[in-house]
Amino acid sequence: MKKAEELIHIEEEKKQLLVLVKNREDMWKGNDKMLEAEAYYGKKDKLYEASLIALDYQKKQLLSEYRETRTNISQVANDKLTLDNLNQYKAALDDAIALQDRIKQLTKKEDTKELEKELKKLEDPKAIIFRIQN
């Protein structure tokens, strides 16, 4: 009886986490589409170029690293999903959204000349991400 209750509790937790993950995915995809548009950045060309590099890198990492989890979610194969898989994927999505939010903040900031000078010199996506976040 106790084992059955534990399994039910895990399944309920998984369902709640799935809803959170799907919401985060939708938010991430919406932000991604918005941040791909050059017009969104106004005259901040270097921020736009660096952001594209960083976001593209992060997207490829996310899609590659969590391919199996994403496949199981899309195929509604909940029995193949674990709380750990979902929590890790959610954390990765949260990180991706945090970078997107930081880029959105920077586009609204009036003076980004110094940052853009630094970003112009960077080519490594990890270095660009680090600089944008700090």
Image (cartoon, rainbow, N blue to C red):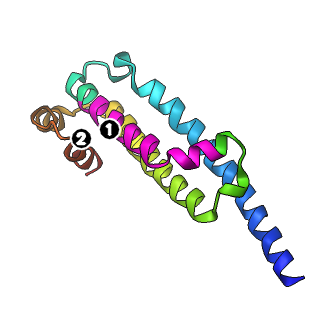
Q: Nearer the viewer, residue 115 or 62?
A: 62
3D distance between C-alphas at marks 1 and 2 = 6 Å
Q: Is residue 46 left or right of residue 73?
A: left
Percent of width and height locating residue 57? 32, 38
Q: What residue is shown at x 45% (from left), y 30% (from top)?
A: 32
Q: Residues within 10 Å of mark 1 (few under 14, many from 20)?
A: some
Q: What residue is shown at x 20% (from left), y 26% (from top)?
A: 46
Quadrant housing residue 3: bottom right
Q: Is residue 52 magenta?
A: yes
Which is nearer the N-term, disc 1 or disc 2?
A: 1
Does the residue at mark 1 contact the one at mark 2 (Cβ under 8 Å)? yes
Q: Which residue carries the number 1 mark?
A: 57
Local SS, label 1: helix
Looking at the image, which residue sits at the far right? 1
Looking at the image, which residue sits at the far bottom? 2
Q: Please report the bounds of the magenta region as a residue range.
A: 50-72
Quadrant housing residue 53: top left
Percent of width and height locating residue 9? 79, 70
Q: What residue is shown at x 38% (from left), y 38% (from top)?
A: 60
The image shows residue 47, relative to residue 23, as above or below, that is above
Q: Is residue 27 left or right of residue 32?
A: right
Amino acid of disc 1: Tyr
Q: What residue is shown at x 72% (from left), y 44% (from top)?
A: 76
Q: Magenta region, mostly helix, strand or loop? A: helix
Percent of width and height locating residue 84? 57, 64
Q: How many marks?
A: 2
Q: Residues within 10 Å of mark 2 (few under 14, many from 20)?
A: some
Amino acid of disc 2: Pro
Mark carried by residue 125:
2
Local SS, label 2: helix
